[in-house]
Amino acid sequence: MSYTITHPDYNLIASVNNQYYSQDYLEYNLPFINELFLSKLPVGSNILDVCCGVGRLAQMLLSKGFKVTGIDSSEAMLHYARENASNGEFIFSDARDFELPPVFEGAISTGAFNHFMCYEELKSAFESVYKALRCNGLFVFNILLEQGFQAGWNDIVLSDAKDDCAWIVKHTYNPEEKIGQIKITGFRLIEGNWQRLDDIMLVKSYAADEVISALENVGFKQVRVHHSEPDKPRESYFVASK
């Protein structure tokens, strides 16, 4: 099956993500990961990390005594994941179309599913996860819903500068199309020369009912939704069981 590529060239930005961004994002999500996921699984459980990125979450799970398999569609990200979480297993694969045996007690994903640009792609990813879980396996992930985009997405500009890199990120959102754009301009110092990166990453917003429908249509049950901030949620966390 062929899918649209909607992410920037992670071979260029993976090192910046690894060094400056990934740990902060993990720490932001950690209270929800602990409450909704880790508190429900016995230590030693086999966990699937979907769209594992540079492996910060896998690293933390391994340190707590869990077994971890990560999948990601970026070889550059997986390079860092294998360094950061050397005791984990990492597989190069697209989350929308992978096949693993049902050996996992839990599956988790952070920051990934808005990158699937239609309902069918989202459903396909959920189906792949469903097939990889044991009976009664737990699936937890976060996603930015429509209200999350509307509450605080437009004109957000993030910028930072380090000795060897600098970047500016601007968010825009079209509520009619339900499509967000992440415009990235960055510079990295490589072998004494500054290399520029310009890219646009597309993201798709979903209603909670759409996400629940996709989960239930592939067989998930007991679906629950938790919001990071009830009034203006930055992220929403979904919990489901096989």
Image: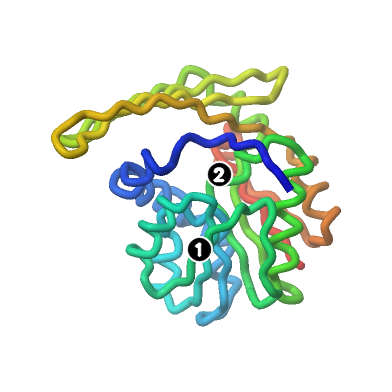
Up the image or down, 92 lies above or below 132; here it is above
Task: Say what secondary structure mark 2 lies in.
Answer: loop
Which residue is found at the position 79% from the left and 61% from the top?
220
Which residue is found at the position 57% from the left and 41% from the top?
235
Horizontal and vertical percent position of residue 207: 74, 35
Q: Nearer the viewer, residue 144 or 127?
A: 127
Left of 221 or right of it: where is 82?
A: left
Left of 44 or right of it: where is 24?
A: left
Quadrant occupied by the C terminus: bottom right
Horizontal and vertical percent position of residue 183: 46, 23
According to the picture, the residue beneath numbered tag 1 turns out to be 34
Q: CA distance from mark 2 to mark 1?
A: 13 Å
Which residue is found at the position 47% from the left and 17% from the top?
155
Q: Nearer the viewer, residue 6 or 57?
A: 6
Up the image or down, 46 lies above or below 97; here it is below
According to the picture, the residue beneath numbered tag 2 turns out to be 228
- For residue 230, the mark is none
